[in-house]
Image (cartoon, rainbow, N blue to C red):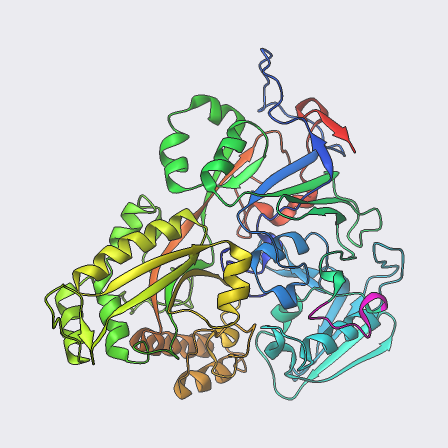
Amino acid sequence: MRHDGSRYAHHGSFILNSRFVIILALTGTLLACGNPPSTRIVDYDREYPPENGGTMIDATRGEPSGLITMIAGEAAASAVAQNIFSSLLRYDKNLEFEGELAESWEVSPDQRVITFKLKPGLKWADGQPLTSADVLFTWKLITDDKTRTPYGSDYKLVIQAETPDARTFRVRYAEPYAPAINSWAGLDILPKHLLEGKDINNTAFARNPVGSHYYKLDKWRPGEQISLVRNPLSTQGPAHIERLVSRFIPDEASQFLELMARNIDTMALSPVQYARIFPARPELHRQFSLYKELGNSYTYLGFNLKRKPFNDIRVRKAINYAIDKQELIDGVLLGMGEPVASPYKPGTRWSNPNLRPYSYDPQKARHLLHEAGFRDTNGDGILERNGKPLTFEILTNQNKQREMSAVLIQRRLKEVGIDVKIRVLEWASFIGRFIKTGDFDLVLLGWQLAIDPDQYAIWHSSQQAPGQFNFIGYKNQRVDKLLERGRMELDPDKRMKIYHEFANILLEDSPIVYLFAGYGLQAMHKRVKGIDDPAPPAGIGHNSQDWYIPRPLRRTEISQ
């Protein structure tokens, strides 16, 4: 999972395994901003043969804290790092496993041993050989208790890892582990020759990485952009586009102005931009293609369960009943979202169909708060208990949907006697100063999830150390046992029942308020060719290495 922001993520969003999400990085080319107006009408719908070269530019709200995803644990980092680092396996367009660094893999009949055979002649971007020793080194890093990572639990189930030769990596589990293959599709392999003996938590490598994938870092301009350039030693062969540039633009309105000015090629649209601005601007449809898909993510309001009064389930449920989720879907998403009652993508087998979101019921909310001992003792409309007013702060990052959601939530909670303040922060500060330290009352965030249903890293009580994903402090012994059983159960139907029960307990406990699952709304300039249409199950970004920009459609660029 990631915070959207690895296997899990948040929208930052801590990321579905991000190798098939549209995530593009940045480069060190000077681009002629805005391009002078031209009277020439360009036919962007014309077919062109594939060719190499050109620069593709995207925009991201958050600047990565670093590019070692096992440490950063956020979507902003993974978005760039997935172009630099490779994993043993990856998903194809139909969400089936295929080799990336691995030429083949074999699972033993008892499901406890996986043997990976690496492709021959693999090299790092600096020319050094990439061997099974690098894979073993990466496994040792992520399972080292000194490594501050939210992803270690998957790999600590390996009881033995060995490298019989330079191309063979073998792992053994004590018991069959259902997400095992998926976990090896989500681990960026790191170079032993550059990181051995270094403190992985505090290394300059995070800002100046050397990988093995399609691209390598060109230049990182703090506060501005990251540039990637094509890696001639890529283990996966050459990509078509020469440079990827990711610009840091926290405000989506500013991003949209840059999109219309042709200074960026793609961005995630807001519902207003998608449903109102684009239909009213025919020239935008001439230049851009739009994509809409429900991803593996949801937005939520999370309680700090280690702080009063959020350790009281009556208060948590009261807040859940006081929030009108449909109002958020209609008002913030313009209807382009789905209600959520479990931590899984709606409509999938893992989402319990019998669960329903908490209804909007302010009367029930007031009743629960009254049961918890809160009264309006001075007639100002704000409830109190033991002389202390029921007031707290919602913390979120610079994200218009979240900011708008926070304002609507603030209004609804005030109606039941709760005084709420809203604090909006830049992403890196938000994660570093508050999330990783647990210094918050409530957070308004999103989870971007892996395809595999295992959510041990988010909800198991053991995952509460600084930098891990259970930062809200949730603890439930029944949930712990279900999560432990679920990751060891190989029968899909039995596994589904386990996760349905887990989701039922989670909804009853209300450690978070599910707000909505929004549709991903992407605009892509038609100068970028090679995109699958219609989009396959893995999304349009699954084959970004095959995208290309025909020479007649490229921007004017001045090399630095």
Pick the residue in front: 389 or 482: 389
Q: Quadrant of residue 419?
A: bottom left
Q: Residue 540, relative to residue 406: is it above or below?
A: above
> In the image, 278: left or right of 123?
left
How many numbered discs? 0
- Quarter-of-image position of residue 354: bottom left
Q: Report the residue at 61% width, 18% height from top.
A: 36
Work out whether 19 lies above or below 54: below
Quarter of the C terminus within the rendering? top right
User: In the visual, does 6 lie left or right of 274?
Assistant: right
Looking at the picture, how far across and down is residue 133, in whole percent? 83, 73
Q: Is residue 480 magenta?
A: no
Is residue 100 at least partly visible in the picture? Answer: yes
Quadrant housing residue 475: bottom left
Is there any visible trace of residue 1 in the rendered image?
no
x, y percentage for residue 338? Answer: 34, 54
Report x, y in % for residue 125.
83, 54
Position of residue 418 in the picture relative to residue 528 (left or right): left
Residue in the image at 13% along x and 71% along y: 376
- x 17%, y 70%: residue: 383
Q: Which residue occupies the foreground of this view, 321 or 247?
A: 247
Q: Position of residue 51 (x, y in %)?
A: 75, 32
- In the image, what residue occupies the spot 41% across and 49% down? 519
Which residues are drawn in magenta? 193-202
Q: Main secondary structure of the magenta part?
A: loop
Residue 295 in the image: above or below residue 306: above
